[in-house]
């Protein structure tokens, strides 16, 4: 069995056969995972400096030279690297006095911080499968982002206390600005919110839970929702970027809602983390520095703040190393533009907009397919995996170690 | 003069676009699934646009030419959807309040139809803008 590192569900039941450089047989992969496994053979990177192919040793030496001569380097990415590589990255950042940030500062970071500090109660996905009778997808669409979430954990499976499952025992609720694929599935309990209207909707739920008339939404439907939540024996909320981006600095309202629900019954929260090891990076950073992301090691001690986020640091740094991430595709134009103007080092198995703009490209093995390691699933469960394809490519951890040795 | 329509764009995910992006960010398949905007029927009528019509999407941050697609969702005039991609990110501001996340899901933009001979913005054009 192989592990799929295509998303943070880290599905452990994958059967994949590669023959003569092609994926010839697969079992249990979702569409997203299938794309991830197929990608092992498309648009792989080669060592490059200034667009010219070079030896791996030359690329590593050039990367070390750039980082060594930089006064304020930024190290960004990390959510698609193993815990072992992330640990090597933290050591490199300490040595360089660099700024270090992960993708979570653009998505689930503000919620993950509350989960890891225990302000918001969480659980494992196995608990959800065994006990949950209500699952709320708030600003998330697992049918697109985590395709096997519903079938493995939250809706369809028969769990220890949920033998009658979705037919009789599980209710799925969706709160979203659009009728997503998941919302179509749970159409009896689909609640549309306006962009930025999530806080107002939370206030309305709090009102109905307190027996008051809600100020927004269809009152009858809101009262029905309140009733459903009160009848829940064991519930789980899965917030996605839709909720996070909408709430921003009003995250305390979500804390209040979860606390209120837990006065009535049991409700746990699992953030719908996208990349396979974003949570691992947050946990490791918290353990090593006391902060989950956006940390500067300049001056020795770890300092956290928005000025050390990748978005800010892209404009103040004089070099950047990007690992397993494509910020030029995924981040706002201004940030992408600022990064592209820096001496950029990209460590990535595959070609991207970021590798195209990089001064130095270092090819790496794909975690889970070509190299093993450890990662943390979206619910905090640590999972070890072994490679299933032989390769001569170095892992992220090996590359970072070699860069550090050369500095 | 071509009609203009003001919309709020929310970026969302799509499993087919995600799969295409994993295989190649530079393929026609990824471009065709990314360089598009999903509009309410009423907004399509106001723009006199049909599915596949090329639209200029513009705001203070940037502009892109993408294809229009009619939404299958319930009525949502003034609300448009784009799949998260380098095309949508051309329109996202990186100027935010300290500690806030960029408005990936609340992009104000103006839509207008383009001349027939205008092309959908290519990924190479986006790369050139970033590296300029």
Image: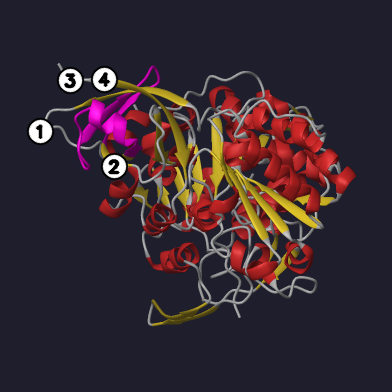
**N-terminal of the two: label 2 or label 1?**
2
Frontmost of labels 2 and 1 is 2
Q: Is residue A43 left or right of residue A132?
A: left
**N-terminal of the two: label 3 or label 2?**
3
Given residues A315 and A56, the one toward you in this image is A315
**N-terminal of the two: label 3 or label 1?**
3
Q: Which residue is labeled 1 in the image? A: B117
- The chain identifier of the residue carrying mark 4 reads B
Report the residue at 39% width, 17% height from top. B60
Q: CA distance from mark 4 to mark 2?
A: 16 Å
Give percent across and percent down for residue A150.
60, 63
Badges 3 and 2: C-beta atoms under 8 Å apart? no
Q: Which residue is labeled 4 in the image? A: B4
The local crowd at label 2, few if under 14, some if 14 to 19, many if 20 or more residues have their Cα within 10 Å, is many
User: Start and end of the magenta stretch?
Assistant: B37-66
Q: CA distance from mark 2 to mark 1?
A: 19 Å
Badges 4 and 3: C-beta atoms under 8 Å apart? yes
Q: Which residue is labeled 3 in the image? A: B2
A73 is higher (above) or lower (below) than A102: above
Q: CA distance from mark 1 to mark 4?
A: 19 Å
Res A181 label: none
Marks 3 and 1 belong to one chain? yes
């Amino acid at each position: 069995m192989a592990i799929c590192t295509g998303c943070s569900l880290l599905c452990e039941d994958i059967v994949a056969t590669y023959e003569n450089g092609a994926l010839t047989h697969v079992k249990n992969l979702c569409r997203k995972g299938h794309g991830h496994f197929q990608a092992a053979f498309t648009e792989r990177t080669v060592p490059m400096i200034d667009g010219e192919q070079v030896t791996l040793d030359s690329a590593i030496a050039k990367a070390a030279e750039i980082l060594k001569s930089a006064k304020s380097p930024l190290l960004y990415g990390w959510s698609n690297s193993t815990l072992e590589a992330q640990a090597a990255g933290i050591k490199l950042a300490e040595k360089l006095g660099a700024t270090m940030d992960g993708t979570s500062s653009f998505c689930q970071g503000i919620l993950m911080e509350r989960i890891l500090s225990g302000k918001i109660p969480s659980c494992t996905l196995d608990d959800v499968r065994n006990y949950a009778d209500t699952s709320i997808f708030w600003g998330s669409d697992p049918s697109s982002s985590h395709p096997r979430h519903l079938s493995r954990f939250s809706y369809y499976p028969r769990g220890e206390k949920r033998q009658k499952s979705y037919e009789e025992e599980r209710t799925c609720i969706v709160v979203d600005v659009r009728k997503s694929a998941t919302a179509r599935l749970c159409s009896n309990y689909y609640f549309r919110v306006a962009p930025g209207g999530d806080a107002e909707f939370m206030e309305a739920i709090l009102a109905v839970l307190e027996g008051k008339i809600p100020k927004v939404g269809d009152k009858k439907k809101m009262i029905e929702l309140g009733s459903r939540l009160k009848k829940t024996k064991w519930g789980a909320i899965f917030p996605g970027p839709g909720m996070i981006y909408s709430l921003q600095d009003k995250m305390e309202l979500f804390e209040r809602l979860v606390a209120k629900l837990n006065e009535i019954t049991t409700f746990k929260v699992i953030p719908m983390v996208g990349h396979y090891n974003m949570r691992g990076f947050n946990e490791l950073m918290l353990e090593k520095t006391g902060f989950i992301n956006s940390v500067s090691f300049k001056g020795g001690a770890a300092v956290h703040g928005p000025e050390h986020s990748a978005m800010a640091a892209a404009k103040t740094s004089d070099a950047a190393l990007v690992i397993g991430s494509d910020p030029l595709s995924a981040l706002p134009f201004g940030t992408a533009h600022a990064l592209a103007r820096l001496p950029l080092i990209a460590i990535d198995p595959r070609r991207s907009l970021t590798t195209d703009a990089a001064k130095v490209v270092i090819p790496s093995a794909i975690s889970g397919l070509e190299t093993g390691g450890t990662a943390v699933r979206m619910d905090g469960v640590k999972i070890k995996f072994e490679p299933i394809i032989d390769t001569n490519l170095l892992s992220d951890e090996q590359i970072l170690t070699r860069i550090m040795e050369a500095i | 003069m071509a009609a203009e329509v003001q919309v709020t764009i929310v970026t969302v995910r799509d499993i087919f676009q995600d799969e295409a992006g994993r295989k190649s960010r530079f393929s026609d398949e990824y471009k065709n699934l990314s360089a598009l905007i999903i509009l309410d029927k009423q907004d399509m009528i106001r723009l006199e646009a049909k599915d596949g019509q090329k639209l200029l999407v513009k705001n203070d941050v940037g502009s892109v030419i993408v294809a229009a697609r009619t939404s299958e969702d319930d009525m949502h005039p003034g609300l448009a959807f784009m799949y998260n991609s380098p095309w949508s990110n051309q329109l996202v501001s990186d100027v935010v309040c300290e500690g806030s996340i960029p408005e990936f899901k609340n992009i104000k933009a103006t839509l207008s139809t383009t001349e027939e001979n205008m092309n959908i913005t290519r990924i190479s054009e986006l790369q050139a803008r970033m590296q300029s």
